[in-house]
Amino acid sequence: MKKNIPIRFIALVLVVALPFILQAQWLPQKNYPKNYFGWPVNAIKAIVANFGELRPNHYHMGLDCRTEQVQNKQVLAAADGYIAKVKIEPWGFGRAIYINHPNGLTTLYAHLNNFKPELEQYVRQQQYRLQKMAGVIRYSGKYVPGKKGEFIAYSGTTGGSQGPHVLLK
C-alpha cells in the first residue's frame, strides 16, 4: 500500500526551506558606493555607539563618532556635496548640518558646537531675521562645503547628547 505525502507536510517543508533557498548571495547584488564616504571627524577613527544599538525607548539610528572626549574637533564633509539645510534645536540633534551628495544620498552631522565661520555668520543673520534661535534654515546651494574632507563645523555636545561626539547619519 502506497502512502501519500500530506499536502500540509509539503507546504511546511517549503515554508521552512524557502528562506534558505533564496539566500542573499543568490539574489542580485546591489551596487552600493564603496569608499565614497570619508571619516567625518579630525580625530582618531573610533565609534562610541553603533547603528541599530538598542536604547531604552528606541534604536540608535546613526553612528556616534568619537571626538577623544573633547569638544571643538574639526568636523569634515564625508563626501563632495552642498549644505541643504541647518537645523538648530535645544533637544534631539542640537545643532546639525545636512549635506546632499551628487549620488542622491544625504549625510547628517549632529551635536555640533559651531559651524564654519561663514556658515555660522549666515545662520546668525537668519536667526535675527526670523526672530527665533531654533528652527530649520534651508539653502539653495550657496554655501558649498566643496570636496570630501573639507572643514564644515566643530564637534560638540548640543541637543540630546550625553557627551562630546559627532552623530553621523
Image (spheres, grey):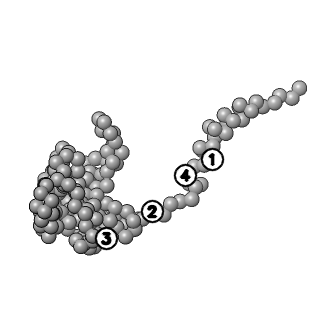
C-alpha distance separating marks 1 and 2: 24 Å
Q: Secondary structure at mark 2?
A: loop
Numbered marks: total: 4
**Is residue 39 shown left or right of residue 132?**
right
**Which residue in the structure is indicated by mark 3?**
80
Closer to the chain start, of discs 4 and 3, is: 4
Specify the label residue 96 is tagged with: none
Q: Residue at x 63, y 40 (%)?
A: 17
- Please name the residue shown 30% across and 36% down the image: 57
Q: Amino acid at mark 3?
A: Asp
Q: Which residue is mark 2?
A: 32
Q: Nearer the viewer, mark 4 or mark 3?
A: 3
Which residue, given by chain and number where applicable, does mark 1 sit on? 21
Q: Residues within 10 Å of mark 4 (few under 14, many from 20)?
A: few
- Indicate the quadrant where residue 9 lies: top right
* Identity, as a three-letter code, of the amino acid under mark 4: Ala
